[in-house]
């Protein structure tokens, strides 16, 4: 299934090819034309009548990149996108196109000084061990610039819940593909963007080229409904439906679009919830400020533990997102416009 | 000027929800311009046509800082996020107002020391006893502002939202005072400046002006052991040289200084270390636009008791009108 | 004119971000014989075009920023000491004891002073003095000073360049070294045939906002852009893997900000021509004009070549002249080699 294929593919910011190729194959036949722009965004258009509605999801995932090889053959790295150092220790990664297994180890407890365990290990002090016996061997197998992603496979976790890496935002990509399976009397502008995790780099450029009248961003968003967080800090909750947000650090959603989506949600019995925090940002941040401005809203799938090796989402939430976006597009087809 | 300023300052218009202030401004400015329109982000653009001169963009932002409701707990207490750079300690134990006029007090969970104060620990209390009761009056997503008290003593005015309703007031007065201007003047009342100069970006892209001047407030260096700054209340319009968002176009800045000198308009030169304005994004729009700022000195910026001097505001109005009577020097 | 002389001349000039025109005037003078068209834009960028030959010529933009970090007068106090703020990323610890020039009605020489050690408490000695507590001493009386200096006047660090065992040290090497690379590129291209139209841009305000790169790229609409900037040269106390050796060649960057085909193209050219080079992985923002160029309009394939520079953002920035020359040669050969196949290869497969 496509979400499995997408989450198990490798695509750190700037090296999204594997993911792009999967998506190209998926949209072939579903759109009138598609192309890849100078940054690597996969853009597509279907239809030529009615308002231009942009649907966006980003292809890149957070990961690591080899920066240099140390004397002993360890791969020293930088994080690409925001990852907390604390989730890196004692993990497996897949290195390069050939997906060589590598490990990020840690000093055994027996060898630690008293109190050492109180302090987190900094990523600058970590390295990936691919079992190379020398610097030269390591350099040949994984030269600087090689991408490394978490070694996590897609699997079910209980009922209707799945775990995988990169749900942010392969879940959004998969939902977008699902939405495309319907017909709409609209000009659909599809953007699978690059480098969102590096600062929303691909989205603005895509919107500049597509010139939409409005945009919907499909994201995988934080879901902090876990122990240690107070109820008002639960940014979203698993299983409670598509996440709509009024505002985050990068944009204020178009109110009319949000109001329309909540109306549709109520009328059609589609589960939705409001984001309880205003932290973070997504491609909407760049899209809404392109050219003369684009009314934009995000519809997101709650994902626990995003930006870590394993994240968790509910398939029901994904279904809610798909249903809500489809209903919204039908509403635009029927004449809805986000004018104030 | 004071009446207009009061109407503007006490109107509700936090970033992202500028509807009410936009209507107020639209009503005030319509009679002085040829055309008024609203763009995709909600910017209000009022145009006064000239007679074949240059395209001038004047920008003042309509939005003010505030808070947005994120969660209503079962006892009816309201949790929130700040919208724009609102220092949370300015809110503690102060009244705030909703769009519909409802008032609330701001409280905090118990803390040992003021250093522990954080927005996650704070809440707004509207006196509802339960979630159901609260939901009858407010919803998640509602925006609040400082309680709108407005006082003036002679030319000194104390109120919320002088940032940047004072600038909006100056623009409206310019529209009123400007006669026979050769240039096409676009008065842009922008949205979401407090969130990162957002409205100005798209407004400038659409207008492609020949020159852009923002009118916003700036801080002063004239309070006890205050920041190192040469700007004082009551010493005239401040002509900006540099802030975090831009270095003013030198010829534009020099032209403004020359006009001020020639016409005897009180002015001061401004270097602001922390803070930016709409001019920052106007300057880098498309192929670049000569941009600058005329600032209104303001003490206690981003509090509920910002202080300006209407003499400085009038100087700003006079300076802009006088400048627009020239060939702009660019 | 030799590239070394050009570099020594332009780093001696004063051009803090926002006030670059004196340097742009010198750049224009020296580049005029090497290009076909010159214009300046609203932000003071100097855009110089050397036309290529052939049909459907792609537009290639090279950018090096001409602004230097510096200071600005915030106020002149009652006793005649000048207070200031930073323009760009200035480390306040590099300032005490530095000579400066305040560019007011006339150029006024000053010294940044600090409390003598004898009068400092142990606690004070442990902390660096924040920028707004430092001051410039000009020796002038407050009245004389106020005639010449006002708020908003730019201030440059006073430092003339000098040679040091084959290295060159001075202020503003970041990024006038890049400007010198562009000079070398155009001198080489004068003797070569090339298909592409080359837009050599001396950009402004990189240190504060990348504003020059943003507007110039928008205006030029290049098909390909390469920024030429500086990167960290090796020094004691900084891990080796974060810096580059001097005199071992310019640094070619790869990463999200860089189009892979441009990285590969530059790498291959260096190898084919046996030019010394080093490589760098930049996982995110490169902190250069390339960051702005890449997302102009509908996107621009971008590259970055950097000169290793020790002690960046001080008045003793140090580099190896040979790295500047080699960077110039590498870029000239690369630009001359761009053909339709290469442009086709920019498309993502």
Image (tube, rainbow, N blue to C red):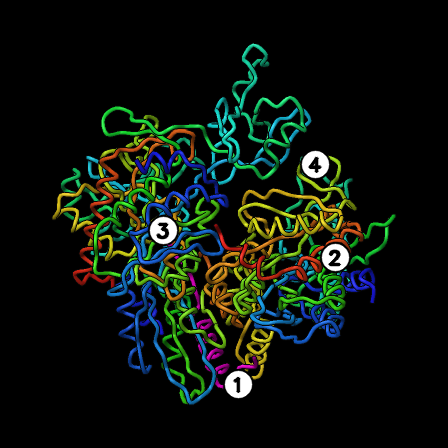
- What's the CA distance linking mark 2 and mark 4? 30 Å
Could you confirm whether marks 2 and 4 are on the same chain?
Answer: yes
The residue stretch that appears in magenta: B304-330
Residue B260: which quarter of the image? bottom right
* Chain letter of disc 4 in the image: C
Q: Position of residue B171 (x, y in %)?
A: 39, 74
Question: SS at mark 1?
Answer: loop
- A280 is higher (above) or lower (below) than B216: above
- Spatial distance from mark 1 to mark 4, Cα to Cα? 55 Å
Q: Is residue A328 above or below residue B1?
A: above
Question: Residues under labels 1 and 2: Cα distance?
Answer: 47 Å
**Are both tags, 1 and 2, on one chain?**
no
* Cα distance in 3D space between marks 4 and 3: 40 Å
Q: Distance between the residues labelled 3 and 1?
A: 40 Å
Q: In the rendered structure, are the residues bearing label 3 and label 1 in contact, judged by CB atoms less than 8 Å apart?
A: no
User: Is residue B309 rendered magenta in the image?
Assistant: yes
Mark 1: few/some/many CA within 10 Å (<14, 14-19, 20+): few
Residue under label 4: C238
Image mark for residue C329: 2
Residue that extends furthest to the right in the rendered view of this protein: C165
Residue in the picture at 55% in, 25% down: A121
Which residue reaches farthest top? A110
Q: Mark 1 lies on which chain?
A: B
Element carrying mark 2 = helix
| Number of numbered labels in the structure image | 4
Looking at the rendering, which quadrant does residue B10 occupy? bottom left
Local SS, label 3 = strand
Judging by the rendered image, the residue that carries numbered circle 1 is B327
Q: Which chain carries label 2?
A: C
């Amino acid at each position: 299934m496509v979400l499995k294929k997408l989450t198990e593919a490798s695509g750190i910011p700037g090296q999204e090819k594997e993911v792009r190729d999967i998506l190209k194959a998926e949209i072939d036949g579903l759109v009138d034309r598609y192309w890849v722009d100078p940054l690597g965004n996969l853009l597509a258009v279907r239809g030529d009548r009615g308002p231009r509605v942009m649907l966006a999801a980003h292809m890149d995932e957070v990961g690591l990149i080899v920066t240099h090889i140390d004397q002993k053959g360890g791969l020293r790295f930088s994080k690409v996108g925001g990852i907390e150092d604390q989730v890196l220790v004692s993990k497996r990664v897949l290195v390069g196109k050939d997906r060589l297994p590598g490990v990020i180890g840690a000093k055994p407890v027996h060898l630690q000084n008293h109190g050492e365990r109180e302090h987190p290990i900094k990523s600058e002090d970590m390295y990936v061990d691919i079992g190379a016996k020398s610097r030269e061997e390591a350099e040949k197998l994984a030269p600087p610039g090689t991408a490394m992603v978490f070694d996590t496979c897609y699997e079910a976790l209980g009922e209707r819940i799945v775990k995988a890496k990169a749900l942010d935002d392969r879940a959004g990509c998969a939902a977008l593909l699902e939405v495309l399976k319907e017909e709409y009397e609209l000009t659909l502008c599809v953007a699978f963007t690059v480098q969102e995790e590096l600062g929303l780099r691909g989205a603005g450029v895509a919107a500049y080229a597509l010139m939409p009248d409005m945009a919907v961003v499909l994201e995988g968003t934080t879901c902090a409904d876990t122990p240690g967080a107070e109820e008002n800090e639960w940014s979203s909750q698993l299983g409670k439906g598509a996440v709509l947000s009024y505002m985050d650090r990068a944009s204020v959603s178009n109110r009319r679009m949000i109001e329309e989506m909540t109306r549709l949600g109520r009328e059609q019995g589609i589960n939705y919830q409001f984001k309880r925090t205003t932290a973070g940002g997504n491609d909407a941040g760049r899209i809404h400020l392109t050219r003369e401005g684009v009314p934009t809203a995000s519809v997101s799938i709650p994902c626990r533990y995003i930006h870590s090796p394993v994240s968790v989402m509910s398939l029901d939430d994904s279904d809610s997102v798909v249903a809500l976006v489809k209903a919204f597009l039908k509403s635009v087809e029927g004449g809805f416009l986000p004018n104030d | 000027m004071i009446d207009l300023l009061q109407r503007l300052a006490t109107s509700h218009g936090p970033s992202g929800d500028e509807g009410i202030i936009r209507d107020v401004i639209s009503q005030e400015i319509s009679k002085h311009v040829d055309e008024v329109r609203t763009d995709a982000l909600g910017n209000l653009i009022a145009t006064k046509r000239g007679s074949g001169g240059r395209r001038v963009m004047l920008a003042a932002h309509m939005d003010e800082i505030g808070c947005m409701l994120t969660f209503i707990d079962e006892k009816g207490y309201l949790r929130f996020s700040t919208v724009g750079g609102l220092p949370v300690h300015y809110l503690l134990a102060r009244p705030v107002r909703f769009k519909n006029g409802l008032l609330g007090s701001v409280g905090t969970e118990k803390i040992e020391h003021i250093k522990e104060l954080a927005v996650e620990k704070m809440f707004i209390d509207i006196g509802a006893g339960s979630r159901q009761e609260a939901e009858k009056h407010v919803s998640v997503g509602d925006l609040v502002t400082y309680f709108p008290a407005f006082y003036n003593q002679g030319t000194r005015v104390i109120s919320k939202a002088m940032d940047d309703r004072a600038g909006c007031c100056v623009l409206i007065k310019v529209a009123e005072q400007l006669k026979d201007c050769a240039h096409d003047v676009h008065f842009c009342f922008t949205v979401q400046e407090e969130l990162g100069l957002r409205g100005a970006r798209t407004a400038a892209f659409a207008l492609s002006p020949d020159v852009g001047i923002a009118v916003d407030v700036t801080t002063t260096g004239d309070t006890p052991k205050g920041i190192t700054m040469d700007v004082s209340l009551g010493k005239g319009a401040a002509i900006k040289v540099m802030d975090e968002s831009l270095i003013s176009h030198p010829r534009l800045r020099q032209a403004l200084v020359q006009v001020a000198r020639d016409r005897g308009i009180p002015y001061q030169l401004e270097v602001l270390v922390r803070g930016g304005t709409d001019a920052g994004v106007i300057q880098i729009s498309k192929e670049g636009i000569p941009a600058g700022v005329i600032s209104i000195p303001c003490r206690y910026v981003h509090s509920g008791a910002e202080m300006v001097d209407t003499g400085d505001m009038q100087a700003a109005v006079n300076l802009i009108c006088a400048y627009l009577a020239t060939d702009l020097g660019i | 004119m030799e590239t070394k002389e050009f570099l020594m001349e332009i780093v001696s000039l004063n051009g803090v971000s926002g006030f670059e025109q004196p340097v742009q005037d010198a750049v224009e003078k020296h580049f005029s014989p090497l290009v076909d068209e010159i214009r300046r834009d609203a932000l003071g960028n100097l855009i110089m075009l050397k036309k290529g030959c052939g049909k459907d010529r792609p537009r290639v933009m090279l950018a090096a920023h001409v602004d230097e970090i510096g200071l600005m007068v915030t106020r002149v106090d009652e006793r005649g000491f000048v207070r200031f703020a930073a323009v760009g990323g200035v480390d306040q610890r590099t300032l005490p004891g530095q000579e400066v020039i305040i560019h007011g009605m006339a150029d006024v020489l000053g010294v940044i002073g600090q409390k003598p050690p004898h009068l400092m408490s142990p606690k004070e000695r442990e902390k660096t003095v924040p920028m707004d507590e430092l001051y410039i001493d000009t020796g002038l009386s407050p009245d004389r000073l106020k005639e010449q200096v006002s708020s908003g006047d730019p201030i440059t660090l006073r430092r003339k360049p000098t040679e040091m065992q084959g290295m060159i040290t001075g202020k503003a090497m970041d990024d006038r070294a890049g400007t010198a690379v562009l000079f070398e590129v155009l001198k080489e291209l004068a003797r070569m045939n090339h298909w592409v139209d080359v837009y050599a841009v001396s950009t402004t305000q990189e240190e504060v906002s990348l504003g020059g790169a943003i507007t110039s790229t928008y205006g030029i609409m290049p098909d390909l852009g390469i920024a030429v900037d500086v990167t960290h040269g090796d020094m004691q106390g900084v891990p080796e893997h974060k810096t580059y050796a001097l005199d071992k060649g310019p640094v070619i960057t790869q990463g999200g900000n860089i189009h892979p085909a441009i990285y590969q193209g530059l790498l291959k050219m260096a190898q084919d021509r046996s030019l010394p080079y080093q490589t760098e992985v930049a996982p995110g923002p490169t902190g250069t004009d390339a960051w702005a160029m890449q997302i102009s309009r509908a996107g621009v394939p971008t590259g970055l070549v950097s000169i290793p520079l020790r002690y960046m953002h001080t008045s003793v920035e140090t580099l190896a002249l040979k790295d500047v020359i080699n960077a110039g040669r590498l870029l000239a050969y690369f630009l001359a080699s761009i053909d339709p196949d290469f442009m086709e290869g920019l498309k993502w497969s």
